[in-house]
Image (cartoon, rainbow, N blue to C red):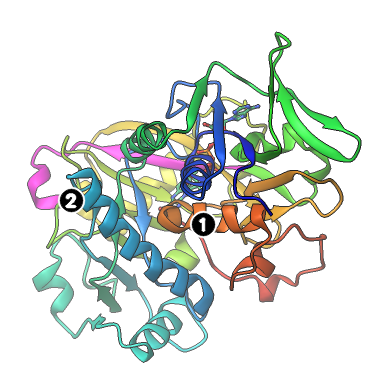
């Protein structure tokens, strides 16, 4: 395929911006369009923090992709001249002994087998090294130094700037309502006022709004609301690494994970669970029950935070695919259309490598991930076969 196609990317979240940047660097003429501002206030890529980890249970594919992404984060930090990715490590705790077949032990085994220097917690380590945690309740776990968190909203803004600097035309004030088609070829998109943006290729990267433009995908991906909580303790310094790194506490079973205090002293935590299926434009508020569950978790696990007043809370939307895998592929039926979305609550960490996957899909280049993330038919999946992938 010629490497000088015009490409319209719809959506300037992490999928769209990384695709735009990579495609422009590969020689295409790229426009990325979003209602704006970037980051869009309702975009999933717009938050204080996102977890970056390579711990993916026995799933070696995501783990490999994660390790490549961490190399990329280090390069991006160097390029930005400031650290928007904080390599603070990650603490994974369990309230029962870790066992093979469960997320934590499988992650530990896979990663140590690949030579990563994980630190298994010995008796007394939790109380000594990470004193905010209830060390009577959490009896097992490990610390992975190759992990951390990313300042998601800041990074999204920086990537928009990087894209513009690389020659991408970054258009705000454009909300696509319809894809344009000539014969069997998608050729652009139009906005409510009739404005049209035309291109040889269209990449739809509209996050939870993807199925508004492509309703035929609504049986394979959908928006799911998950609660997020923010606290501002009086002395945030004790909620920073090394004694308070990013954490996951019984997460595949409890859903809870969180982050150290950021530069404004805000400590964030969230729950990765079944969530609530919602409309992308639904009110982003949490329920009293979700807040009560958060308080109960804190009382049991992080007692020093249990009585700290809530600074803020919100519902954040995943674009969940039915199988938890990303959706980065060409439409097998129409020409000129790629979809890059389906983050399923865990895509941000891969930002430095996502653009390459989308660009490969557009150029028809096979990579080790193409098949897993391809445009695929809905298939039967047994509950016991579902992997834990979240956050
Ligand atoms: C609570 C929560 C916690 C998470 N935690 C983690 C984590 O710890 N680690 C991790 O790796 N991932 C995490 N994720 C997942 C990660 O944040 C997402 O997978 C990723 O940000 C999704 O990016 P996106 O580009 O698909 O969507 P978005 O960021 O939502 O971007 C979509 C863009 O499309 C634009 N758009 C929409 N409709 C149109 C249209 N019609 N025309 C033009 N533009 C349009 C929007 O304005 C928006 O800017 C989390 C997600 C949530 C909700």
| Residue at the extreme right of the image, as rendered | 183
34 left or right, relative to 322: left
Location of the N terminus (image quadrant): bottom right
Give residue 356's mark: 1
Q: Is residue 214 left or right of residue 130?
A: right
Q: Earlier in the sequence, mark 1 or mark 2?
A: 2
Q: Residue 304 has which mark?
A: 2
Determine which of the numbered discs, if any, sits on residue 306 in the image: none
Residue 61 is at least partly visible in this image: yes
- Residue 12: give x, y in percent of width and height: 51, 34
Q: Is residue 83 left or right of residue 225?
A: left
Residue 93 coordinates in the image, percent (x, y): 32, 71
How crowded pointer 2 is (Cα within 10 Å; few <14, some 14-19, many 20+) is rated as some
Specify few, some or many for label 1: CA neighbours under 10 Å numbering under 14, 14-19, or 20 or more. some
The residues colored magenta run 224-239
**Residue 9 falls in which quadrant of the image?**
top right
The residue drawn where x is 58% and y is 53% is 359
Is 212 on the left or on the right of 85, as rendered? right
Q: Is residue 280 above or below residue 80?
A: above
- Front-lying residue, 31 or 321: 31
Looking at the picture, tell me which residue is in the foreground, 328 or 257: 328
**Rendered location of residue 83, percent (x, y):** 20, 48
CA distance for labels 1 and 2: 43 Å
Secondary structure at badge 2 equals helix
């Amino acid at each position: 395929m010629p490497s000088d196609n015009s490409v319209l990317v719809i959506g300037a979240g992490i999928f769209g911006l990384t695709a735009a940047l990579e495609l422009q660097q590969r020689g295409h003429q790229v426009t990325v369009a979003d209602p704006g501002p970037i980051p869009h206030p309702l975009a999933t890529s717009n938050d204080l923090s996102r977890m970056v980890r390579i711990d993916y249970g026995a799933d070696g594919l995501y783990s490999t992709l994660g390790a490549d992404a961490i190399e990329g984060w280090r390069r991006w930090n160097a390029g930005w001249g400031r650290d928007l990715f904080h390599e603070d490590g990650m603490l994974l705790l369990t309230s029962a002994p870790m066992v093979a077949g469960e997320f934590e032990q499988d992650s530990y085994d896979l990663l140590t087998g690949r030579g990563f220097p994980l630190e298994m917690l010995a008796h007394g380590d939790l109380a000594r090294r990470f004193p905010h945690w209830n060390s009577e309740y959490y009896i097992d776990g490990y610390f992975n130094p190759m992990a951390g968190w990313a300042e998601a909203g800041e990074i999204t803004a920086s990537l928009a700037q990087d894209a513009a600097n690389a020659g991408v035309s970054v258009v705000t004030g454009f909300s696509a309502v319809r894809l344009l088609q000539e014969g069997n070829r998608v050729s652009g998109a139009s906005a409510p006022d009739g404005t049209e943006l035309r291109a040889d290729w269209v990449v739809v990267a509209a996050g939870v709004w993807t199925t508004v433009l492509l309703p035929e995908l609504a049986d394979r991906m959908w928006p799911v609301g998950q609660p997020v909580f923010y606290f501002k303790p009086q002395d945030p310094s004790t909620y920073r690494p090394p004694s308070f790194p990013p954490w996951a506490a019984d997460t595949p079973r409890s859903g809870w994970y969180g982050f150290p205090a950021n530069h404004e002293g805000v400590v964030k935590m969230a729950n990765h669970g079944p969530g609530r299926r919602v409309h992308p434009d639904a009110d982003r508020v949490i329920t009293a029950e979700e807040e009560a569950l958060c308080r109960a978790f804190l009382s049991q696990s992080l007692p020093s935070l249990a009585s700290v007043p809530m600074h803020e809370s919100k519902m954040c939307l995943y674009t969940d695919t039915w199988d938890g895998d990303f959706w980065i592929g060409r439409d097998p039926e129409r020409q000129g259309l790629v979809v890059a979305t389906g983050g399923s609550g865990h895509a941000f960490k891969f930002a430095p490598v996502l653009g390459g996957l989308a660009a490969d899909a557009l150029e028809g280049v096979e990579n080790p991930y193409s098949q897993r993330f391809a445009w695929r038919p809905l298939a039967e999946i047994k509950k016991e076969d579902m992997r834990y992938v979240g956050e």
